[in-house]
Each structure stands twice: as C-alpha cells, then as structure tokens.
Amino acid sequence: MIAEIIAESPAVHAARIEALYDVTFGPGHFAKTAERLREHNRSLPDLNRLALAHDGSVVGVVRMWPVLVEHGGQALFVGPVAVHPNHRGRKLGLELCRLALDVAREKGWSGAIIIGAPAYFAPLGFVPVSPRQLVFPGPQDMKRVMTLSFNGAANAYRGRIIAHRV
Ligand SMILES: CC(C)(COP(=O)(O)OP(=O)(O)OC[C@H]1O[C@@H](n2cnc3c(N)ncnc32)[C@H](O)[C@@H]1OP(=O)(O)O)[C@@H](O)C(=O)NCCC(=O)NCCS
C-alpha cells in the first residue's frame, strides 16, 4: 500500500531514492547515455514526485532534470522512473509522471523529453521523435526517445541536448 505521494525533500529522500534505483536498475544504471544529462546537473525537487510506503521507504519515483535543446531552449528531461517490484501492476510510475508533468506545465515549462518504452509512456501523451531530431551526449536508441509538448514548443525541439543546471 502507498501512504502518500509527495515532492522530494533531498535531505530526507535522496538516499532512499538511490536505494530504490539500486533495486530497480542495478549497477549498469550510471553507464547509460541518459546519465550524461544528469551528472553535474541537479534535478528539480519541487517537480520530482515520490511514492512513500507506510514505513517511509520510497517505493516509486520520477525525477525531472533541466536540459537545454540546441533549437528549442529549456526543456525537462524526465527520469528515471522506477517502481519497487512489490508495488508494480497499478501503473504507479505513470501516476507519478502525470503529477510531476502537471506541476511542470503549471510552472511554465515548454515540454519534456523522456527515454523509455513508447508503449508504457504513450498514455501520458509522449510521442516518439524522428530519427535525427535530437542528439544525445552518447549512443542512444532513438526509437526509445519521446517528447511531450505543453504549449507546442516540444514539436520544435531539434539538435543537441545538454545538461542545464538552473
Ligand atoms: C517501468 C515501471 C516503472 C512500471 O511500473 P508500474 O508503473 O507499476 O507499471 P505496471 O506494472 O502497472 O505496468 C503498466 C503497464 O505498462 C506495461 N509496462 C510496464 N513496463 C513496461 C516496459 N518497460 N515496456 C513496455 N510496457 C511496460 C505493463 O505491461 C502494463 O501494461 P498493461 O496495462 O497493458 O497491463 C517498473 O516496471 C520499473 O520500475 N521498471 C524498472 C525501471 C525502468 O525500466 N524504468 C523505465 C525507464 S526510465
């Protein structure tokens, strides 16, 4: 059972989030190209969303990272999305993303970029990019890259993506 869904307070939750990522992704996690957009960057705790169990453990998480798209300006890079194996089957990951994206939209962000399974993220409105639309800081299977536009701007995202700490 989930006790509550809240924003991240890094001093309280950061270690518990890392513990969940260790369970869900394992050690290969930091080798991915997506991680190049997160290292030396800082996620946005007021947008990040966590699901807490009654014992206070983090059983679901999504983080949101500021990035800069060469043609398109500031955008959010979403992820990793993770749900503890004991809490899967109720689309909790989608619920966390939906809540985080709603806040981002209200705060005026133009849109979001995500790497993941299109079948899983399509219900949130994410659409796959065209093969050469975006350039990541490393090898990337572009069939797993999707964007979501809050105001039409994400349709214009083109070129290199870099971390953009705010
Ligand atoms: C991906 C993840 C967050 C989904 O957990 P969840 O929100 O509890 O999702 P559910 O188990 O309720 O699955 C919801 C639906 O998505 C589908 N789904 C789940 N993971 C999927 C994946 N990787 N690819 C495609 N479909 C997926 C399920 O089959 C299910 O489909 P259905 O509604 O037709 O039955 C969880 O499996 C996880 O933490 N995985 C490891 C980390 C990861 O791969 N994160 C995503 C990339 S950032």
Image (cartoon, grey):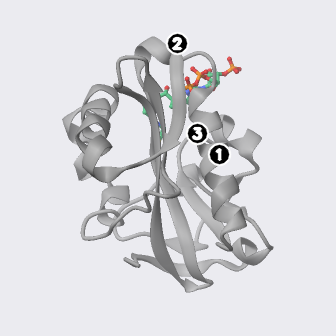
Pick the residue in front: 134 or 123: 123
Q: Give the residue type at disc 3.
A: Leu
Pick the residue in front: 64 or 160: 64
- Of callouts 2 and 3, the N-terminal one: 2
CA–CA distance between discs 2 and 3? 15 Å
Pick the residue in front: 143 or 78: 78
Query: To which residue does mark 3 refer?
Result: 96
Q: Which structural element holds mark 1?
A: helix
Is ligand 1 less than 8 Å from the beta carbon at label 3? yes
Looking at the figure, which quarter contains the C terminus? bottom left
Query: To which residue does mark 1 refer?
Result: 99
What is the crowding at mark 1: few (fewer than 14 residues within 10 Å), some, or many (at least 20)? Answer: some
Residue 165, x across and y down, in percent? 37, 77
| Residue 133 vertical position relative to residue 125 in the rendered view, above or below | below
Figure quadrant of residue 12: top left
Q: Give the residue type at disc 1.
A: Leu
Q: Is the C-beta separation of discs 3 and 1 under 8 Å?
A: yes
Query: To which residue does mark 2 refer?
Result: 1
Q: Which structural element holds mark 3?
A: helix
Residue at 59% x, 15% y is 89
Residue 130, x across and y down, in percent? 67, 65
Residue at 43% x, 69% y is 136
What is the crowding at mark 3: few (fewer than 14 residues within 10 Å), some, or many (at least 20)? Answer: many
Residue at 73% x, 45% y is 124
Figure quadrant of residue 152: bottom right
Residue at the right extreme, as displayed: 152
Q: Give the residue type at disc 2.
A: Met
